[in-house]
Image (cartoon, rainbow, N blue to C red):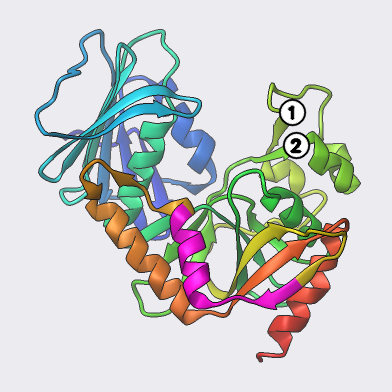
């Protein structure tokens, strides 16, 4: 295999991407641009991306998923031993083998490439390095290097709460995707350095972000803001793995009050697993089993809380700081 066109450092796990067209790196540069390192570094996981008119839409194996994926459309997922195939008919195919450390994405020229294969390749590259991406926000505590993870299903208010905390001295690692590493025995996490999508309602509740915003909103009432632009207003942390201090499950308050209370570890485990572990027609795939094991280690290692956010999201800052200070 020839040398990679680009390499990205995923907390020591080097992802090398091989492609003849620089434009095919766009999705990965959008996610990982700040993690790009010299191409001379030896990758531990290889991805080849190619444009081609010919797509193999009928690979061998067992069907594990057949249906619609939000934003990406219809997809089939097929498992053949240690290889997972994704087929987006007439658009793109992907083959991923995490055990052997390789993946291939083939895309029809001139079509909009789905986002899902890129995310699954990233998942597999991380898994090969014993790391797992979780749908959580992450923020450093004021005056400390440790991070709190904030979990909630999409639309519950992770971004609003994260930005509110960032205005109160917390450091923003990510508003949506944190990478968890429990391989060393301790629990550490780092944030995927991608743009923050700010909703119009979030902008109204956190007026401090107004200078970052432009006049145009997408069909979901959102606009992406780069971490570089946000760093002029709040503290944005770099993608360094830091110890995890606590896991918070976010919920909307039934009244206008904001409150923080201990949460049973079993409840926290179920809530986090439901949003982060996917099952197919044949049950849990090996990667998903390992992700579930990682969630179990996280929940058993750090305090877990339920955070109900009311009319003033910034009130969460004092509650979190006080709760964790009492455990020092």
Write the start and end of the magenta stretch as one range: 260-274
Q: Is residue 101 magenta?
A: no
Seen in the picture, residue 202 relative to 284 is either above or below; the reply is above
Q: Which residue is mark 1?
A: 221
Q: Which mark is residue 58?
A: none
- Name the mark on residue 199: 2
Residue in the foreground of this view, choosing between 59 and 243: 59
Residue 265 locus on image (x, y percent): 50, 76
Task: Please name the residue shown 42% across and 60% down the image.
Answer: 11
Whether pointer 1 and pointer 2 mark residues with C-beta atoms closer than 8 Å, the reply is: yes
Viewed as shown, does residue 212 lie left or right of 228? right
Q: How many marks?
A: 2
Q: Which of the two discs, 1 and 2, labels the residue nearer the N terminus? A: 2
Q: CA distance from mark 1 to mark 2?
A: 6 Å
Residue 124: x and y, percent? 30, 48
Asked which quadrant contains residue 282, the reply is: top left
Secondary structure, magenta segment, majority class: helix
Q: Considering depth in this image, is 279 or 43 the residue closer to the camera?
A: 279
Q: Residues within 10 Å of mark 2 (few under 14, many from 20)?
A: many
Q: Where does the image place residue 1, in percent across and percent down from the top left?
A: 16, 35
At a point 84% along the width and 40% down the height, the residue shown is 203
Local SS, label 2: strand
Front-most of 41 and 140? Answer: 140
Give the farthest residue toward the front. Answer: 254
């Amino acid at each position: 295999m020839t040398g990679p066109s680009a390499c990205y450092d995923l907390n020591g796990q080097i992802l090398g991407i091989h492609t003849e067209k620089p434009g095919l790196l766009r999705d990965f540069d959008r996610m990982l641009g700040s993690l790009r390192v010299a191409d001379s570094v030896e990758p531990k996981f290889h991805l080849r991306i190619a444009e081609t008119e010919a797509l193999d839409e009928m690979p061998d194996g067992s069907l594990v998923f057949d249906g619609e994926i939000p934003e990406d459309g219809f997809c089939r997922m097929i498992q053949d031993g240690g290889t997972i195939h994704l087929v987006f008919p007439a658009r793109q195919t992907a083959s991923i083998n995490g055990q052997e450390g390789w993946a291939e994405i083939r895309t029809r020229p001139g079509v909009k490439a789905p986002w899902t294969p890129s995310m699954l390749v990233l998942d597999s590259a991380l898994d090969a390095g014993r790391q797992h991406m979780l749908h959580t926000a992450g923020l450093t505590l004021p005056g400390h290097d440790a991070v709190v993870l904030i979990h909630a299903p999409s639309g519950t208010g992770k971004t609003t709460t994260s930005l509110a905390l960032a205005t109160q001295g917390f450091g923003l690692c990510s508003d949506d995707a944190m990478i968890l590493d429990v391989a060393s025995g301790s629990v550490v996490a780092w944030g995927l350095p991608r743009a923050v999508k700010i909703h119009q309602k979030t902008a109204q509740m956190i007026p401090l972000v107004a200078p970052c915003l432009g006049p145009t909103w997408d069909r979901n009432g959102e606009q992406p803001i780069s971490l570089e632009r946000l760093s002029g207003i709040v503290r944005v942390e770099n993608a360094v793995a830091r110890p995890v201090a606590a896991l918070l499950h976010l919920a909307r308050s039934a009244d206008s009050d904001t409150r923080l209370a201990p949460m049973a570890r079993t409840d926290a485990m179920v809530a986090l697993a439901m949003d982060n572990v996917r099952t197919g027609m044949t049950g849990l795939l090996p990667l998903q089993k390992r992700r579930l094991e990682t969630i179990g280690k996280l929940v058993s290692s750090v305090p877990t809380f339920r955070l109900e956010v009311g009319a003033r999201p910034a009130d969460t800052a004092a509650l979190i700081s006080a709760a964790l200070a009492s455990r020092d």
